[in-house]
Image (tube, helix red, strand yellow):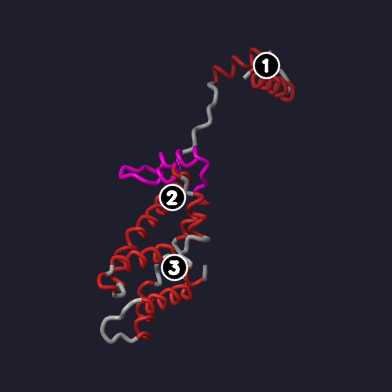
């Protein structure tokens, strides 16, 4: 397939599709979405939030100008033109107004617009964007939600370290036969280490 006919399903979109498995896509969808639940589901399904954000950033990058100009020239040559439209002006203005769209989304929108176009005339920028914008919004929303998951993970409270009470500490010291008032520090610390090592082995 020639470069001018590539749709953008290669590269960034392929990577995004590979990383966004069905369970992860479900974790990023829904009207009553919560970052803490999404974080749990993404982790449970082996997803990496930083990798997913990076993949979305690449898949949201604007299409390349070379590809866009080749695609528009093909569209110009293959479609009947209504009225006296100047080709150079049409290519320039149409390209300028579509250049912010990702390649795969734009390619699909152009194809759909051509198929929906009546009497075989070239679709306008508005028709193409009307088909592209919903898909672009979905991708941007998924990226935003991933960023909320990342922010939640950074700010989630760390569980407090459990510490024993003075009474529990006294009971442990008594059990291992330590008197901190009379025993050398190195002696009772060594006994405590041995005690805790034994507890870990039993656990």
Q: Which residue is mark 2?
A: 146
Task: Identify the element where label 1 is drawn.
Answer: loop
Residue 20 visible in image: yes
Residue 180 visible in image: no
Q: Which residue lies at the image location 50% right of the left edge and 32% below the top edge?
A: 160
Q: Which residue lies at the image location 40% right of the left edge and 72% below the top edge?
A: 99
Sequence-wise, the earlier of marks 1 and 3 is 3
Q: Which residue lies at the image location 50% right of the left edge and 39% below the top edge?
A: 45
Residue 166 at x, y percent in the picture: 55, 20
Majority SS type along the magenta span: helix
Task: Please name whichever residue, 193 or 71, is drawn nearer the observer in this view of the structure.
Answer: 71
Is 203 displayed left or right of 1 in the figure?
right
| Tag of residue 179 | 1
Q: Which residue is mark 3?
A: 62
Sequence-wise, the earlier of marks 2 and 3 is 3
Vertical placement of residue 104 versus 17, above or below: below
Task: Please name whichever residue, 127 or 192, is drawn nearer the observer in this view of the structure.
Answer: 127
Which quadrant of the structure image shows residue 60?
Answer: bottom left
Q: Look at the image and give the residue range highlighted in magenta.
A: 23-50
Front: mark 1 or 2: 2
Task: Identify the element where label 3 is drawn.
Answer: loop
Which quadrant of the structure image shows residue 100?
Answer: bottom left
Front: mark 2 or 3: 3
Q: Judge whether residue 43 is colored magenta.
A: yes
How far apart are the alpha carbons under marks 1 and 3? 72 Å
């Amino acid at each position: 397939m020639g470069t001018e006919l590539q749709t953008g399903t290669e590269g960034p979109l392929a990577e995004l599709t590979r990383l966004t498995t069905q369970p992860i896509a479900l974790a990023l969808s829904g009207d009553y979405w919560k970052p803490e639940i999404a974080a749990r589901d993404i982790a449970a399904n082996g997803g990496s939030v930083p990798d997913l954000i990076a993949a979305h950033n690449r898949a949201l990058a604007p299409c390349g100008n070379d590809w866009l100009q080749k695609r528009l020239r093909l569209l110009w040559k293959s479609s009947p033109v209504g009225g006296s439209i100047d080709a150079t002006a049409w290519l320039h203005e149409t390209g300028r107004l579509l250049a912010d769209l990702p390649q795969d989304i734009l390619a699909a929108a152009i194809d759909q617009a051509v198929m929906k176009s009546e009497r075989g005339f070239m679709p306008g920028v508005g028709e193409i964007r009307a088909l592209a914008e919903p898909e672009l919004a979905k991708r941007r929303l998924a990226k935003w939600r991933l960023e909320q998951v990342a922010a939640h993970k950074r700010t989630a409270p760390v569980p407090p370290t459990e510490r024993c009470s003075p009474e529990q500490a006294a009971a442990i010291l008594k059990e291992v036969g330590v008197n901190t008032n009379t025993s050398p520090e190195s002696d009772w610390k060594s006994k405590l280490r041995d005690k805790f090592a034994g507890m870990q082995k039993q656990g």
